[in-house]
Structure formats: structure tokens, C-alpha cells
């Protein structure tokens, strides 16, 4: 006779094996894409977050593309995910936004960016928030901001030229944050009682890290940074409510007007999450792109030569060499926009764009079950050798004669479809104006750093330290 414990143990083992089998073989009313679901609960999350120094397609994705093809299944942070490196499926996903797919991010991302963040909004609320942002970053607003962006760039470069060495990533991030925070909330670090950007630095360090919320981990520090930044923003909003301004002077004023309207759909939590995301997105991604562009220009003298010629020509055509940039001059920077597109193609700052399947979807013989997550993988598209010759080479001339201002099946550095990044034009303006100020009046040499690390997002773990000096008159 076997003891009761033997039977209980046997049943428990059967239950565990059955659970593992179901995890590794999810139910589907068709053919799931090939792939591995990894270990129960953990899935392949550890492999996805494993640091790498490659500029190529992330090893996690590349290895599975070679094994399973351009569409495969996996599991990340407890969710079944279909990974798409297929340009046709990516395009289909973006075009079916709100019908078959909707914006979705893992629970950890929602915790970081806020449950009311713009990326988690859908339908009319998303369109409403998008229009609010366009009020700040639309073409007419950018025309007015152009002199401010140029002034900020010139002032920063002048200051840096008097320092022995600067970390380009840190310096440009501070420059852009100061400008954006002023436009959004009239924030001035010199007069403020708290350092708002310090909290964003803590936030950034754990943004794309393994989601373990235990004191001491990068993810925990990230959440603490968000909490402190949100408390500062909430305090600012409350103070502004007590002493409203007669004339709208920043985005906070605009938000307050919207909150006070009787028919408004805006709430304070949504407004604060929007402000948080705008502050983060405006400086972190752009400073990474500028840093990489400066590094590429140093490594590719022929590119730098042509860029300098374009910007020197702009100055030579002016009646006064001391005149500031005009909107027409900015729009004429064809080669500059080619440099920007090539930089963000290789940067792949966003390693994945997430959506959720609203209903069962069939594509190329595969079935994606309702409720599953889908991750569009921009690096796999941008570094596809059948679409880009020598894809790892920095070659701005490949963009000659191609529209450099939108998204396509083979270019999604700023997203795609109806959720194409509304801050794209602002990013390009900042990059183009900064490069104009840099190459016309300054020269620079690399001191140390410049190595990249992906976790899977782009980082410069040792910074990129350069020495900037003024050119001879």
C-alpha cells in the first residue's frame, strides 16, 4: 500500500507537468507561429533583457529569426507574445490600429509611465490627447520655437567650449530638458526648490531593465524616480491652480484651461501622466540620437564634409552672417535630414513597438489568438540587408531622393500608422538646429567612451566624452 502522501505527490507532479505542457503548447484555433514559450511565468524574459554590445539586430531576435523565420512566438514578463520582423505584418498591424490591434505595453511599462499615459489611451481619448500635443509641437508652434532652439544650442556650445571635456549624452540631455521643461511647465532649475531632472535620471536608469521591484534594483529606483517626479509635477499643477495666469504662456496653462472646461474629458491623472511622458520623451531619445550623430560624424569625415558644406552655404547666402536661422533655411537642409534618418535607423532607440490583438487574426498562414501581445521589431526592419545595402554602414546618401519625413514599411524609427510619433518634427528640428550650430562654428575630438550597450534599449554606459573648441574665424 502506498501512503496518502505518495498519491498527493503524484497528483501534484501530474498537475505541474500538465501546466508546463499547456504553457509550452498554448491553445490556438489554427497554426501558431513557431517559437518557444520558455519557462512558465518567466518565459524568455531573461534572454530578452540580456545586455549586448551589438549594433546589429538584437541577438535575442536574430537567433530566433534564423531558427523560426520572420514571425515567431515567445513569452515576455508573463505574457504570450508574437514577435514580427516581417515588414508586411508590421504595416498591417499599424493599418489595423483600433480594429484588429490596439496599443498595449507590458504591465511593467504601464507602472513606469502611468496607467493613464497616452500610450494606454484609445479611440477618442487618444485623438484628443494627440491634438493637445500637436498644439505644442505642430508646424506653426515649431516655427516660433526655432529661434529658442537655436539660442539654446548656441549658448550650450559656447559654455561647453570653455570646458576641458563634456559628456555629449549628459550635456545634450540637460540642454534639451531645460528647453522643453521651460516650454511645458515654465520650469527653471536655478529657481526651483527641487531638481526635477534628477528624478528622471533615476527613472531612465531602470526604464528598460528586468522588472524586479525590490529595493536596490534598477527597476525599483526607476519607480521611485517616477514617484518623485510625479509629486513635483502635481505640486506645480496645484500651485498654478491657486495662482492662474491671465495669458497662456506654457503647456501647463493650456492643460489648466482644458481641465476647467465644463465639457472636458481630461482628468488630472491623465494630464499629469501626459506631462511626464512628454518631458521624458522630448529629451532622452533626442539626446541619444544627437550623441550618436556626433559620434558618426567624427567617424565619417566625408559625411561631416558634406554636412559642413550644406550649412556653410546657408550662412553664405544670408545678407548678414549674424542672422539667425529662418524656417526656409531649416526646411532646405536636405542632406541634414538624410543624416538624421540614417542616424535614427542605426540607433534603433525603440527596440520594440507593442500592440494587443483584439480578435483572432490570420496572416500568412499563421493565427494570432485574441488577447495575445504583438511586438513589432524596428531593428530587424532597419537592418535588413534585402532592404538596405550594407545595413550596418552609416551612409546618409542612401536616403537621397527618398522622403525623409514620414514612415514606411521599411522605416519606423518614429512608429507608424495613426500612432506615428507626434514629437517627430520637434526631434528633427532640435537635431538639425544643433548640428547647424555645431558644424558651422565648432570642431570636436573624442576623449573617451562612445561604446554602446543595449539592454535592449540604447545606452552609452561610459558616456561619450568630447572636447569642443571654436573654429578659427
Image (cartoon, helix red, strand yellow):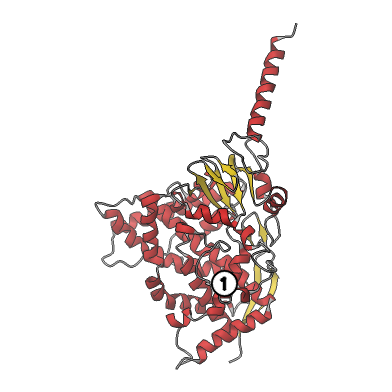
Residue 381: x %, y % from top left: 62, 60
* Left or right: 266, with 366 as reference point: left
Q: Quick one: quadrant of the N terminus?
A: top right
User: Quick check: 315 left or right of 48?
Assistant: left
Does any portion of residue 129 appear in the rendered image? yes
How far from the left and from the top, in percent, is residue 245?
28, 64
Depth check: give the residue in front, 184 or 243.
184
> Viewer-proximal residue, 280 or 123?
123
Judged from this view, the residue extending furthest toward the front is 365
Relative to 169, is 334 above or below? Answer: below
- Tell which residue pokes out farthest to the left in this image: 262
Judging by the rendered image, the residue that carries numbered circle 1 is: 340
> Residue pushed farthest top?
1
How many tags in the picture?
1
SS of the residue at dot 1? helix
Query: Residue 343 sits in which quadrant?
Result: bottom right
Along the horizontal axis of the image, is 433 left or right of 293?
left
Left or right: residue 27 compared with residue 300: left
Quarter the C terminus occupies? bottom right
In the image, residue 468 lies at what x, y percent?
62, 79
Q: Position of residue 401 (x, y in %)?
A: 56, 76
State the residue at coordinates (59%, 73%).
399
Q: Residue at x 59, y 80 (%)?
A: 161
Residue in the foreground of this view, choosing between 369 and 460 = 369
464 relative to 120, above or below: below
Q: Visible in this render: residue 194? A: no
For label 1, the crowd category at 10 Å Cα-Cα, with few meaning under 14, some 14 to 19 and many 20 or more, is: many
Name the image quarter holding residue 129. bottom left
Q: Quadrant of residue 24?
A: top right
Pick out the residue farthest to the right. Answer: 1
Amino acid at each position: 500500500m502506498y501512503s496518502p502522501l505518495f498519491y498527493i505527490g503524484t497528483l501534484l507532479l501530474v498537475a505541474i507537468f500538465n501546466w508546463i505542457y499547456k504553457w509550452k503548447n498554448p491553445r490556438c484555433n489554427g497554426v501558431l507561429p513557431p517559437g518557444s514559450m520558455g519557462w512558465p511565468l518567466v518565459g524568455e524574459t531573461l534572454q530578452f533583457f540580456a545586455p549586448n554590445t551589438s549594433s546589429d539586430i538584437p541577438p535575442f531576435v536574430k537567433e530566433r529569426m534564423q531558427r523560426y523565420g520572420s514571425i515567431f512566438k515567445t513569452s515576455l514578463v508573463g505574457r504570450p507574445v508574437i514577435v514580427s520582423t516581417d515588414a508586411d505584418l508590421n504595416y498591417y498591424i499599424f493599418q489595423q490600429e483600433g480594429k484588429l490591434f490596439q496599443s498595449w505595453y507590458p504591465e511593467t511599462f504601464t507602472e513606469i509611465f502611468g496607467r493613464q499615459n497616452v500610450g494606454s489611451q484609445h479611440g477618442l481619448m487618444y485623438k484628443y490627447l494627440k491634438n493637445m500635443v500637436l498644439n505644442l509641437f505642430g508646424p506653426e508652434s515649431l516655427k516660433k520655437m526655432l529661434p529658442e532652439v537655436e539660442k539654446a544650442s548656441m549658448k550650450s556650445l559656447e559654455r561647453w567650449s570653455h570646458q576641458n571635456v563634456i559628456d555629449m549624452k549628459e550635456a545634450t540631455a540637460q540642454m534639451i530638458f531645460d528647453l522643453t521643461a521651460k516650454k511645458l511647465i515654465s520650469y527653471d532649475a536655478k529657481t526651483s526648490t527641487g531638481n526635477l531632472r534628477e528624478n528622471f535620471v533615476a527613472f531612465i536608469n531602470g526604464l528598460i531593465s528586468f522588472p524586479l521591484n525590490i529595493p536596490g534594483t534598477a527597476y525599483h529606483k526607476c519607480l521611485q524616480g517616477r514617484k518623485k517626479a510625479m509629486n513635483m509635477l502635481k505640486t506645480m499643477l496645484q500651485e498654478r491652480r491657486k495662482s492662474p495666469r491671465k495669458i497662456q504662456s506654457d503647456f501647463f496653462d493650456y492643460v489648466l484651461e482644458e481641465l476647467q472646461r465644463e465639457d472636458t474629458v481630461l482628468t488630472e491623472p491623465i494630464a499629469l501622466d501626459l506631462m511626464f511622458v512628454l518631458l521624458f520623451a522630448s529629451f532622452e531619445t533626442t539626446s541619444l540620437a544627437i550623441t550618436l550623430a556626433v559620434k558618426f560624424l567624427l567617424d565619417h569625415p566625408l559625411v561631416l564634409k558634406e554636412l559642413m558644406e550644406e550649412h556653410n552655404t546657408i550662412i553664405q547666402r544670408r545678407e548678414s552672417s549674424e542672422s539667425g536661422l529662418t524656417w526656409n533655411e531649416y526646411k532646405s537642409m536636405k542632406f541634414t535630414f538624410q543624416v538624421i534618418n540614417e542616424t535614427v535607423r542605426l540607433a534603433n532607440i525603440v527596440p520594440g513597438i507593442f500592440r494587443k490583438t483584439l480578435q483572432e487574426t490570420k496572416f500568412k498562414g499563421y493565427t494570432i489568438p485574441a488577447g495575445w501581445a504583438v511586438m513589432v521589431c524596428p531593428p530587424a526592419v532597419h537592418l535588413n540587408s534585402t532592404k538596405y545595402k550594407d545595413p550596418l554602414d552609416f551612409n546618409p546618401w542612401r536616403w537621397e531622393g527618398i522622403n525623409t519625413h514620414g514612415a514606411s514599411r521599411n522605416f519606423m524609427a518614429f512608429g507608424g500608422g495613426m500612432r506615428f510619433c507626434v514629437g517627430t518634427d520637434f526631434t528633427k528640428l532640435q537635431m538639425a538646429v544643433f548640428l547647424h550650430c555645431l558644424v558651422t562654428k565648432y570642431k570636436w575630438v573624442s576623449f573617451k567612451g562612445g561604446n554602446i550597450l543595449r539592454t535592449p534599449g540604447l545606452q552609452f554606459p561610459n558616456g561619450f566624452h568630447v572636447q569642443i573648441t571654436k573654429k578659427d574665424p
